[in-house]
Amino acid sequence: MASLSLRRLVSACFVVGGLILTFTAVPHFAHAQATAPPVAARDLKMVGLPATDEGLPGAGPIRRDDWFRPIWNERREQFESRRDRDQDAVVFFGDSITQGWGDDFRGKFGDLKIANRGISGDTTRGMLVRVADDVIDLNPRGIVMLMGTNDLDDGATPQTIADNVKLILDELHEHNPEMPIVLCAVMPSSPKKNRPVEKIRELNRLLAEAVYDDPQVTFLDIWTLFANADGDAKLAEFPDLLHPNDVGYRKWAAALRPILATLGFLETEPDNFTLEPGFESLFNGHDLTGWGVRPTPAEDLKAREGWRKADPNAPPWPVITEAKAFDGQTVSDGGRYVARNGRLIVSTPHEGRKIEQLWTTREFPKDFTLKLEFRATPNSDSGIYLRGPQLQCRDYPLAGPYHKLANYRPQDWNEIVVEVRGGVARCTCNGEVLEEEFAVPATGPIGLEGDRGQMEYRRIRIREDG
């Protein structure tokens, strides 16, 4: 039987109390036409594993090992007992790495209501079978997904795994096309675990491709966050080369928090920062007043054209023909720049990479001191324009160019200070020098670039001399 949407048709056999139960789930919209009440997957409470693959959606392995069956049944019994309690939660959906958060999520997300729907050993096809009952029935506010590593261990191809993930995403889109989804890249492991780096890289490429230009999904690159120089897991963070320890979970949580904050789940209080004497704010914390877009300059048009000729797959780089101010808007045209709770967010582009720019509507001809703080998701790439030239502002240890900063705080707030005197800028990050003599024009605006990943800026302020 060809794979069909889980909500359209699922035929399967389940073991219940030693008996084999066969059922067919038909779509909810067909209930009125059915000659007899159908048995929907969600109405079969705490059934066992499907006895065969026949009629199941997706492709690839579903585990039925003796060690796995009790884990599946016990976890799903727990899920059923918590169904009412976990309504409207942010749901984490995955395998043992997700289960390893525990029900308290190690206290990493404060008071956020979260439900853990990870099952140790599960595969993407197993998750496809249970997504309606274990996830969708909770009416989640949002979903965080990490899945696929066990499929590799069982011999599934990266393409098969990515196809199953797409089917899961189809189910979630059908349930609620507005519900935010965070899809995490598969973490590094090791050839010793039957998970070689080339297969994980290919799988992550296919996953990113699957959600390309999908505004409902944010793809979070945690593979780069964890991989060593060879692309494998580090023993200091993955003692068995597969599962993260608490150090690894702390890093994963730090990578997720900025995304969850941008989605409105965390850090919902305004930033009550007090300006230093002599400084004025360039960002009011609640909208984009004072910021906008400017016509794309000739040098950027030339660079854009050259890049596109050299690389047919170069990321989108929209051309701006007319200036526009975003005064009073909380979101820029196109949605890339967002003002929320004291943060000016350069959100993750749905295309994976997209070159965009936001500028102050003012220009700054006098010498000045500019201060701001930024927080980057793993391997993100942005930049701060100083009257035109760009100071690279990135997740420095992973994305460079300043790889060796001792004081940089990954996935946390870092302070940039720029002192412009006589056409030369001295730029520091947390007190460490980035550029000692950075040449800038005589006048121009301040700008923020967007490229890949998410970057947040706050407390953007300036003091002009004279």
Image (cartoon, rainbow, N blue to C red):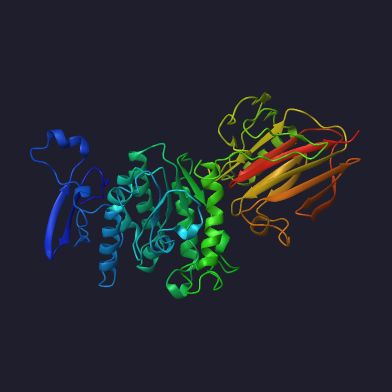
Q: Residue at x 79, y 51 (%)?
A: 428
Tell me what residue is drawn at x 49 percent, y 62 percent: 187
Which quadrant, please, contains the C terminus?
Answer: top right
| Place of residue 223 in the rendered image (x, y in percent of width and height, measured from the top left) | 53, 60
Percent position of residue 211, x then y: 45, 45
Q: Residue furthest left?
A: 35
Residue 350 appearing in the image: no
Residue 263 position (above or below residue 91): above
In the image, 254: left or right of 392?
left
The residue nearer to you, when weighing 419 against 207, is 419
How many marks do you count on the picture? 0
Q: Residue at x 46, y 68 (%)?
A: 243
**Residue 222 coordinates in the image, percent (x, y):** 53, 57
Q: Nearer the viewer, residue 371 or 4?
A: 371
Q: Please indicate whether residue 258 sits to the left or right of residue 429 in the image.
A: left
- Regarding residue 288, the answer to whether it shows in the image is yes
Quarter residue 228 falls in: bottom right
Residue 380 locus on image (x, y percent): 61, 50
Direction from residue 176 to residue 329 in the image, left or right? right
Up/down of 64 relative to 30, above or below: below
